[in-house]
Image (tube, rainbow, N blue to C red):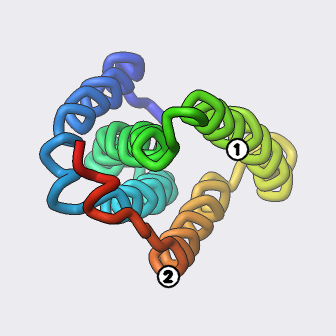
Amino acid sequence: MNVSDPTAKMTLGQVSDVVFLLMLPFLLPRLKAKGILIIGMAAWAVRFSLFALFHQQPTALWMLYTGILLHGMCYDFIFVMGRMYVDKRAGEDIRAAAQGLHAIFTLGAGMFVGSWLSGIVAQKYTHGTLHDWQAIWLIPAAMGAVLVVVFALFFKDSTTKEQTTP
């Protein structure tokens, strides 16, 4: 794609990770867990959409950089917030087991299913040695957008004030 020094540009995602991680304690009281999780899911959809559009307009480097910078929001607002939510909701007697189950679903089964599905999508949109990157990126973007709506409609946080008070 003729992007010079790609590893340095990918480091922007790590910088973004630190910034959004530091923002979580300030955003949590305002947005609550559900709001942060919704923003994180929406960020995934936007990130993948930007990568898809960038492949149509490779001179629009802002799309690539913005997609890379969204990494921190995507990761921290989903994975870290998920761990924090499980930690808050699980009682002390099952907290370790709940955290382990969360890790199995997100880092185990979730990563396995995601990798498997991405292989299917990549095969479907690869013809010989040519990849239709726009279609490959738009599939997870659409899936992310649908999941935002489903999550927003069906996730109910029944935490009471007594449960959130330290």
Q: Helix, strand, or loop for circle 1?
A: helix
Evaluate whether residue 40 shows in this view. yes
- At 40% across and 40% down in the image, what residue appears? 84
User: Mark 2 is on which residue type?
Assistant: Leu
Residue 136 image offset from top left, x and y in percent: 66, 55
- In the depicted view, which residue is nearer to us: 3 or 160? 160
Residue 153 — which label?
A: 2
Q: Position of residue 156 (x, y in %)?
A: 47, 73
Q: Residues within 10 Å of mark 2 (few under 14, many from 20)?
A: few
Horizontally, is 140 left or right of 58 in the view?
right
| Pointers 1 and 2 in contact (C-beta within 8 Å) | no
- The nearer-to-camera label among 1 and 2 is 2
Q: Where is residue 127? Give x, y as percent.
A: 84, 52
**Which of the pair 121/148 is nearer the observer?**
148
Residue sitting at x 26%, y 33%: 21
Question: Percent from the top left, x then y, of residue 10?
Answer: 38, 25
